[in-house]
Image (cartoon, rainbow, N blue to C red):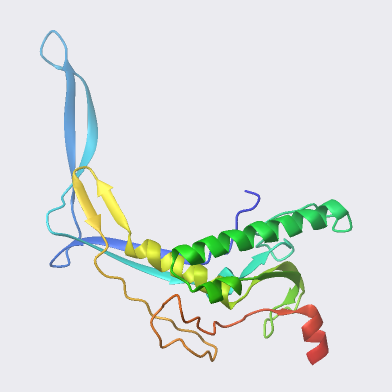
Amino acid sequence: EDGKKESNSLFYQDTWGNQIGEPNANEVMVNHLAVDEDGKKESNSLFYQDTWGNTCYDGLAVLSIENLQFIAMDNRLGHQSVRFNQNAKKPSVKEDIEDFLITLIGNLKKIAEQCGMSQENIEKISATHDLFIKPGSLFTYPEEGILLNNEAIHALVLETQRRLNSFSIIKSKGFVRTENVVTNLTTEFQCSGLDMPLTGDIVPDYACFYVSQERQAQEA
């Protein structure tokens, strides 16, 4: 589908089990719907009944800052996130991109406010449209896209944590909710502030995986 990011920034896996670590069993049940004149089954259906009891839900989520911070507009590397008219010389395309940036930044600020970020950090939220290069990659091909700054990334990280904290599952007459979420920030790059708990007041120095083509040329 157009506009769907192929490189998802959130990876999630989960398991169901009881309190002694055994998986929950599914029992196949037969539902007799009707009988004919001779008392024989006329039709039936199969359904599954999950055993709940002392159920434990365990999930692991990984949030990729690399995929989160960059919104690709170029499809030549196969992970286009948003599509505009391919003729970038048309004024309408530039206007569309500017409108998209305004809407994006506005939505990020709303998310940041909902997650308790300070007003000072909210005002710093920004996104830049340019040609970007990923240093150290095999192919240093410039990609057109939008790069989020530290404050914008932090707003999305906090929102992800907020949703995991309020996560719940309702199934049949059973209800499962999140009791505890443990957050670990790890990176292969040297970053400061990653040993601190996630709060709205302190914005960690997230790793930046992309640099503008102009800046790359200046540093070369």
Residue depicted at 80% across the width and 52% down the height: 85
Residue 220, visible in the rendered structure: no
Left-right relation of 25 to 110: left
Q: Is residue 40 above or below residue 4?
A: above
Asked where in the image residue 128 lies, by quadrant, the reply is bottom right
Residue depicted at 62% across the width and 75% down the height: 149
**x and y, in percent, of residue 119 in the image:** 52, 72
Instruction: Choose between 82 and 122: the one closer to the eye.
Output: 122
Quarter of the picture holding the C terminus: bottom right
Residue depicted at 31% across the width and 71% down the height: 181
**x and y, in percent, of residue 195 in the image:** 41, 88
Instruction: Choose between 90 and 29: the one closer to the eye.
Output: 90
Residue 201, visible in the rendered structure: yes
Residue depicted at 12% across the width and 59% down the height: 54
What is the total number of numbered labels drawn onto the structure image?
Answer: 0
Q: Is residue 210 above or below residue 96?
A: below
